[in-house]
């Protein structure tokens, strides 16, 4: 690290030129690649995916996305002369539009008009899945259909293709977070020159990362929320990493070191902490690949790449900038010795030292209260019932529920393979068995493909898609209703559809989550044990990180599911939490929590190595890092919280979840609970069996001891 710092400082113009070349080169490459983001979801080996694959192979005309045009008569019925001709004319016009495979006339399709005749729907079958359709084609369908809306006849549209096309572009809400970061950086660092350096590092790293992600999107399917999530995480950690190094640089300058020596010493100490912390975050994000869910691979790799590049930028571009502008960085007050110059954080450390057990119990109780709502978390997939009130997809959802029952918006699609002889008698038997199952409201008649070897039936539950009763019905269909018919008739049936896919995703996550947690936590704790030569610190870190994750999930459940403070935070509707969200939160929050753990405990360990006094090590470590941890947390909370101002529900989830996790982790856990426990444990904090310590390799985060500068 010392040689890298010296080289980057001494050849600062070369390093800056290389970064500029990389930014321009990757940007040009991204423009030439012409990639794009698609939400292509698949669950290999699941029953719902088997149904999708079978449709694509044998029933391509039904493999495309199916959306609905919903009609509601404010007066009379849809069959009245005032409405029916207009509806049929619209159906004919929609059938001629690009990407539309077929449109079913509601008056010619059984079950497409409600019993009172006021609500009906026409099914639009597109020629591709929603993620593969051209946005402009779907927008044309929406425009034509909505033009038929008039007094007395409401026309709205629902379905995944419509939902995707209606999603607004993510606004640049991160600008607000950056604005707060600028204010905090000026207050902490004291000069505009110092403030600009973390921002330059963060934006340069993010620019390269997003360009590379765009290039990768031309070769692999990457979810549409991946770049926004990557920017959110990288912007927060990038500023924080640079801030930590700059803070140490200022401390070295206050000791009397010249700019070059201060840069080298800062990189050799704080830079090592950044390297360790960034590696931990990258490991946690890459660990998500163990889940084997392709939909999550793109966001995980994009975020990991962004964090990796911000780490590289902090260790190369920042020392180059210090070589160019380091003499302009204000040094601030103090000598860096908390005992000689007791500031606010040194005084706070002594308060914690006097009441460590009381503060530890109080903070654990507070975090438990925050995390408590997570015990009632319901995992699912947010459907159009969580869309903004007044949107066409939300109106279509509500009108279909009103006319056909709450289960109409979450049907199961049963895809059936006929035996080689093409015996269709089994279809009637299966249809009757499905219709007689408890919890089934209706079943459509079988629809055969052209070769008469595959058929589909749609099963409408009596309950909402998110209800536990719907999940119970899926289990009854798969394990109780269908198997006897398969054995008796020779047909093979698979239950798919959006609701079934969500249930299968939950099962996959539940099965692979233990391996993911074991690998991520195990590697991180092993690294902590090697670095700090302790058993208690890694164990404590694991428990603290779980508390942070629990707090984040508790806040999310409290707001997005239970609806408390929802309107205040800009959340217009409530519903289940996305099934993949807890996994992502675990990976991201575990990594970010480890950042603050490393920043704080590294300085404590440095003080412990100097004098061997556990209480003094905790006091000085907290006094020397408390201000920078607080500033870093304010910046990260502001950046994450700014993404709450957008319109995308998934991004709102991540924004609030990560902001609340960082707030709890930094202000409650790292600045109160961790020092309280360290004071309580005393020398045991740094204990490791002698035999184990001899066998473990030595890895220093603090770097070699720094000699005092020559007074001359």
Image (cartoon, grey):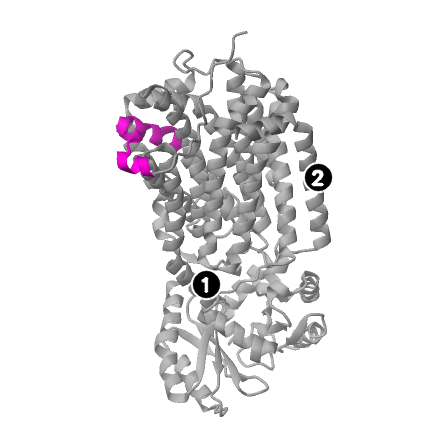
- In percent of width and height, residue 463 lies at 41, 67
Vertical order, 368 against 408 (above or below):
above
- In percent of width and height, residue 410 lies at 48, 67
- Which structural element holds mark 1? helix
- Which structural element holds mark 2? helix
Q: Which residue is mark 2?
A: 21
Give yes or no for residue 270 being in the magenta stretch. Answer: no
Of labels 2 and 1, the one closer to you? 2
- Where, by quadrant of the figure, is residue 77 drawn? bottom right
Q: Which residue is mark 1?
A: 502
Give yes or no for residue 691 being in the magenta stretch. Answer: yes
Vertical order, 253 against 303 (above or below):
above
The reply to whether callout 2 and callout 1 are in contact (CB within 8 Å) is no
| Residue located farthest toward the top when viewing the structure as drawn | 712
Foreground residue among 143 and 451:
451
Q: Earlier in the sequence, mark 2 or mark 1?
A: 2
Asked whether the viewer can see residue 225, the reply is yes
Asked whether the viewer can see residue 71, the reply is no
Span of residues in magenta: 668-695
Task: Answer with left or right where residue 327 lies relative to residue 608.
Answer: right
Vertical order, 323 against 273 (above or below):
above
What is the quadrant of the C terminus in the image? top right
- In percent of width and height, residue 65 lies at 59, 69
- Where, by quadrant of the figure, is residue 160 drawn? bottom right
Q: For the point 38% across and 60% down, which residue is it?
A: 511
Question: Is disc 1 surrounded by few (<14), some (14 to 19) or many (20+) residues within 10 Å?
Answer: many
């Amino acid at each position: 690290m010392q040689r890298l710092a010296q080289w980057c400082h001494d050849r600062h113009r070369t390093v800056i030129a290389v970064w500029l070349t990389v930014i321009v080169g990757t940007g040009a490459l991204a423009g030439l690649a012409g990639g794009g983001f698609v939400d292509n979801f698949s669950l290999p080996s699941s029953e719902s995916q088997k149904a999708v694959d079978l449709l694509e192979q044998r029933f391509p005309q039904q493999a495309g996305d199916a959306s609905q045009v919903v009609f509601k008569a404010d007066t009379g019925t849809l069959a009245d002369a005032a409405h029916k001709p207009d509806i049929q004319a619209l159906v004919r016009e929609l059938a001629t539009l690009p990407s539309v495979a077929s449109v079913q006339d509601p008056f010619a399709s059984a079950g497409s008009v409600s019993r009172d005749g006021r609500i009906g729907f026409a099914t639009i079958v597109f020629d591709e899945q929603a993620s593969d359709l051209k946005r402009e084609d779907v927008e044309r369908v929406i425009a034509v259909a909505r033009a038929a809306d008039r007094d007395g006849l409401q026309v709205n549209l629902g379905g995944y293709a419509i939902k995707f096309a209606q999603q607004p572009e993510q606004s640049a809400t991160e600008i607000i977070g950056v604005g707060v970061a600028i204010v905090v950086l000026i207050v902490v660092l004291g000069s505009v020159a110092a403030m600009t350096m973390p921002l330059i590092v963060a934006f340069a790293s993010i620019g390269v990362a997003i360009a590379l992600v765009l290039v990768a999107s031309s070769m692999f399917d990457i979810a549409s929320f991946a770049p926004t999530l990557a920017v959110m995480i990288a912007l927060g950690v990038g500023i924080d990493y640079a801030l930590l190094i700059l803070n140490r640089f200022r401390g070295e300058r206050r000791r009397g070191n010249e700019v070059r020596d201060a840069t080298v010493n800062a990189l050799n100490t704080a830079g090592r902490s950044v390297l360790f912390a960034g590696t931990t975050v990258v490991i946690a994000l890459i660990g998500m690949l163990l889940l084997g869910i392709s939909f999550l691979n793109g966001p995980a790799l994009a975020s990991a790449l962004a964090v990796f590049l911000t780490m590289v930028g902090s260790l190369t571009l920042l020392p180059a900038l210090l070589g160019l502008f380091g003499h302009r960085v204000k040094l601030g007050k103090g000598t860096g010795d908390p005992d000689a110059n007791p500031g606010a954080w040194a005084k706070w450390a002594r308060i914690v030292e006097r009441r460590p057990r009381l503060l530890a119990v109080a903070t654990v109780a507070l975090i438990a209260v925050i995390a408590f709502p997570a015990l009632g978390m319901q995992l699912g997939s947010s459907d159009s019932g969580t869309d903004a009130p007044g949107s066409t997809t939300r109106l279509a959802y509500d009108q279909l529920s009103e006319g056909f029952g709450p289960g109409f918006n979450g049907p199961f699609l049963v895809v059936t393979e006929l035996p080689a002889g093409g015996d269709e008698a089994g279809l009637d038997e299966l249809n009757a068995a499905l219709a007689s199952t408890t919890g089934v409201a209706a079943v459509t008649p079988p629809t055969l493909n052209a070769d008469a070897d595959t058929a589909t039936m749609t099963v409408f539950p009596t309950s909402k898609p998110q209800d536990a009763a719907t999940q119970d019905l899926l289990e009854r269909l798969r394990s109780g209703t269908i198997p006897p018919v398969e054995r008796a008739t020779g047909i093979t049936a698979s239950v798919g559809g959006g609701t079934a896919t969500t249930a299968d995703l939950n099962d996959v996550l539940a099965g692979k989550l233990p391996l993911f947690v074991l690998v991520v936590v195990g590697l991180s704790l092993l690294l902590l044990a090697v670095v700090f030569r302790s058993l208690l610190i890694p164990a404590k870190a694991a428990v603290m990180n779980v508390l942070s994750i629990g707090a984040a999930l508790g806040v999310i459940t409290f707001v997005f599911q239970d609806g408390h403070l929802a309107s205040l935070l800009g959340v217009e509707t409530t519903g289940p939490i996305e099934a993949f969200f807890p996994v992502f939160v675990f990976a991201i929050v575990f990594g970010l929590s480890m950042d603050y753990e490393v920043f704080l405990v590294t300085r404590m360990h440095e003080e412990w190595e100097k004098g061997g006094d556990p209480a003094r090590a905790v006091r000085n470590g907290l006094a020397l890092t408390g201000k920078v941890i607080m500033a870093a947390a304010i910046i990260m909370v502001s950046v994450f919280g700014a993404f709450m101002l957008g319109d995308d529900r998934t991004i709102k989830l991540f924004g609030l979840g990560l902001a609340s996790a960082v707030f709890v982790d930094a202000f409650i856990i790292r600045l109160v609970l961790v020092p309280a426990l360290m004071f309580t444990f005393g020398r045991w904090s740094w204990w490791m069996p002698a035999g184990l310590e001899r066998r473990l390799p030595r890895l220093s985060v603090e770097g070699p001891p720094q000699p005092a500068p020559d007074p001359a």
